[in-house]
Amino acid sequence: MAEKSYGLLKGKKGIIFGPLDESSIGWHIATAAYREGAELAISNVALALRIGKPQELAKMCGDAPLIPCDATNMQEIDACFKTVKDKFGKIDFFVHSVGMSANIRKGIPYENLNYDWYLKTLDVSGLSLHKLINSALANDVLNDHASVLALTHMAAQRPFTTYTDMAEAKSILESIARNFGSRLGAKKIRVNTVSQSPTWTRAGSGIEDFDKMFYFADLLAPLGNATAEECGDYCTTLLSDLTRKVTMQNLFHDGGFSMMGMSQRMLHLVYDAIQDTENLRKAGYDEETIKRITERAE
Ligand SMILES: NC(=O)c1ccc[n+]([C@@H]2O[C@H](COP(=O)([O-])OP(=O)(O)OC[C@H]3O[C@@H](n4cnc5c(N)ncnc54)[C@H](O)[C@@H]3O)[C@@H](O)[C@H]2O)c1
């Protein structure tokens, strides 16, 4: 995390949805925004606020009000924005750092998703951005030039086998950001998504083979994976006046991973691994493929 404040958010007010504990990306967006001078409110589902950690965060952020809100429930969202407006007046930003998939938690493969949970994933992790923006507009809580930001992952564009139904949720989320962004230009409100590297959080590390996904991205990205702290720093720029003309963008914060094809170091790693046919068998390749590959590699 940056050591000094640049005062980027001095005089600005906003709410962060989704900080859970010190590992959360939302936690680091909140601490970075507070360091940059913002006045904050913190929100999560009521249960998460009761278990204590967000209370710690609120203290660290100048006794920020803690506002319970299930981001899928329009009544709770309306009540949340009304509370925000009572406390702060109109605000300058909000951050959607919310995500959950029961299918991922239970390790259900994509081919066999539980459809009730699938719908819940889409609602919590995608549609909730629409609901938050809709309510923020209806309650007239956003100042002109406000910034709305949501966290996403590259699985929205390209398949990541174990990301299952979250991939679709992220595609919806990014599409909502573009579609609201195109409509809110008239109010000078911008809407963007930040596509973050794999990060060791509660939601992230619940993904099957997350550790392998993490190291794969870390080794391929020229700058290595971006941490939650670094994401917090980056997000402050997108909440600030320095990025007034940035809207409808999906911005990759991933050490360059999304632009990479292959690196020579990774190439050598893979080539060394396939010299041992047992590695290919463990990876699930059939005997015909193994034969083809080992013949060529010799
Ligand atoms: N961790 C990663 O590898 C990674 C990578 C890219 C993007 N992201 C995204 O970053 C965001 C934050 O996730 P995180 O990784 O910090 O994990 P996290 O578990 O710390 O945060 C997810 C938060 O969503 C909250 N939440 C769940 N259901 C909710 C609901 N109905 N209403 C309101 N809040 C609800 C949880 O309580 C939790 O605080 C998510 O959108 C996630 O998909 C994470």
Image: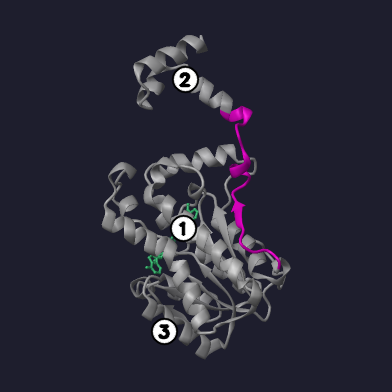
Which amino acid type corresponds to the residue marked 3 in the rendered image?
Answer: Ala
Q: CA distance from mark 3 to mark 2?
A: 57 Å
Vertically, is 189 above or below 254? below
Task: Name the residue type under label 1.
Answer: Ile
**Magenta stretch bounds:** 245-266
The secondary element bearing badge 1 is classed as helix
The residue sitting at 60% across, 53% down in the picture is 253
Left or right: 50 as drawn, with respect to 217: left
Question: Residue tagged by mark 2?
Answer: 274
Mark 1 residue crowding within 10 angstroms, few (<14) / some (14–19) / many (20+)? many
Quadrant for ligand 1? bottom left
CB contact under 8 Å: marks 3 and 2: no
Which is more foreground, mark 2 or mark 1?
1
- SS category of the residue bearing label 3: helix
Residue holding disc 3: 79
**Which residue is label 1 attached to?**
172
Which amino acid, by three-letter code, is at mark 2? Ile
Question: Ligand 1 closer than 8 Å to the CB at disc 3?
Answer: no
Whether 261 is among the magenta residues is yes
In the image shown, does 159 or 202 lie closer to the viewer? Answer: 159
User: Which of the pair 22/170 is nearer the observer?
Assistant: 170
Mark 2 or mark 1: which comes first in sequence? 1
Q: Is residue 163 left or right of residue 107?
A: right
Q: Comparing marks 3 and 2, which lies closer to the viewer? A: 3
Q: Residue 153 placed where, x, y %? A: 50, 52
Whole-percent x, y for residue 108 in the image: 29, 46
Image position, residue 163 (x, y; %) = 41, 47
Question: Marks 3/1: CA distance?
Answer: 25 Å
Q: Position of residue 178 (x, y in %)?
A: 57, 61
Which corner quadrant of the image does residue 125 belong to?
A: bottom left
